């Protein structure tokens, strides 16, 4: 009877312990993403959409926006935000971030990262990485820009070796006006490489 009682106690305790571990990881994950200012990524997505809509509207207007067009654009952007916020706003995606971090890292790993980002070195990393990311993005873009002529010529030479087909999708007859450049770096800090890459 004593063994049965002990077994039943273990069966009841294990789920509680697992739940406590999960709650602990979720709490630590929430603290970590707060330290990492992960909410800035969501803000930047919205800002990028606003910049793109402004640029497209300005281009279509011939480079100058009339007062009426500015008002219409502002109203349109407010509507965009109203549609986007419930789906990609920080309040909407924060629970997913917490869940992902809690699932990806152990309590010990989260403890280590929290200790680091609370240290002087961690705070310096968080403060300076946005500028470092921006500068490295500029370096990559300049390198790709310098490669454009060579890459275009390589594409042209390659296309000349591909025989046309009577059926199927057509092959390119001329190189595109430009090749894609690396995406602009985000302002959100990234985790330093430890056991896995961080976002």
Image (tube, rainbow, N blue to C red):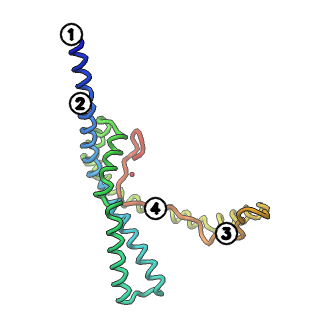
> Which disc number belongs to residue 122?
none
The span from disc 2 to disc 3 (Cα, nearest Å) is 62 Å
> Which disc number belongs to residue 137?
4
Residue position marked by numbered label 2 in the rendering = 16
The span from disc 1 to disc 2 (Cα, nearest Å) is 23 Å
> Which disc number belongs to residue 1?
1
The span from disc 4 to disc 3 (Cα, nearest Å) is 25 Å
Q: Is residue 60 above or below residue 165?
A: below
Estimate the x, y position of residue 17 in percent, counting from the top left: 24, 29
Q: Earlier in the sequence, mark 1 or mark 2?
A: 1
Kindly indicate whether the residue at mark 4 contacts the one at mark 2 (C-beta within 8 angstroms).
no
The span from disc 1 to disc 3 (Cα, nearest Å) is 81 Å
At numbered mark 3, what does the secondary structure look like: helix, strand or loop?
loop
Estimate the x, y position of residue 18 in percent, counting from the top left: 27, 31
Which quadrant: the N terminus? top left
Residue position marked by numbered label 3 in the rendering = 175
- In front: mark 4 or mark 3? 3
Q: Residues within 10 Å of mark 3 (few under 14, many from 20)?
A: some
Q: Is residue 85 above or below residue 59?
A: above
Please tell me which residue is depicted at 26% across the width and 26% down the height of the picture: 14
At numbered mark 1, what does the secondary structure look like: helix, strand or loop?
loop
Q: Is residue 43 left or right of residue 168?
A: left
Estimate the x, y position of residue 195 in percent, counting from the top left: 40, 38
The span from disc 2 to disc 4 (Cα, nearest Å) is 47 Å
At numbered mark 2, what does the secondary structure look like: helix, strand or loop?
helix
Kindly indicate whether the residue at mark 4 contacts the one at mark 1 (C-beta within 8 angstroms).
no
- In front: mark 1 or mark 2? 1
Kindly indicate whether the residue at mark 3 contacts the one at mark 4 (C-beta within 8 angstroms).
no
């Amino acid at each position: 009877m004593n063994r049965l009682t002990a077994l039943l106690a273990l069966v009841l305790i294990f789920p509680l312990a697992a739940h406590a571990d999960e709650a602990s990881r979720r709490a630590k994950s929430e603290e970590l993403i707060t330290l990492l200012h992960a909410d800035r990524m969501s803000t930047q997505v919205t800002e990028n959409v606003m910049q793109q809509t402004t640029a497209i509207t300005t281009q279509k207007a011939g480079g100058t926006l009339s007062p009426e067009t500015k008002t219409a654009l502002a109203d349109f952007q407010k509507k965009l935000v109203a549609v986007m916020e419930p789906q990609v706003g920080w309040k909407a995606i924060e629970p997913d971030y917490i869940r992902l971090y809690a699932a990806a890292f152990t309590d010990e790993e989260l403890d280590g990262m929290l200790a680091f980002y609370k240290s002087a070195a961690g705070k310096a990393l968080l403060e300076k990485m946005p500028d470092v990311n921006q500068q490295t993005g500029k370096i990559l873009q300049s390198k790709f820009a310098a490669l454009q002529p060579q890459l275009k010529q390589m594409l042209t030479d390659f296309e000349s070796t591909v025989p046309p087909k009577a059926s199927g999708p057509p092959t390119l007859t001329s190189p595109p006006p430009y090749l894609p450049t690396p995406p602009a770096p985000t302002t959100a800090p990234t985790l330093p490489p430890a056991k896995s890459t961080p976002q």
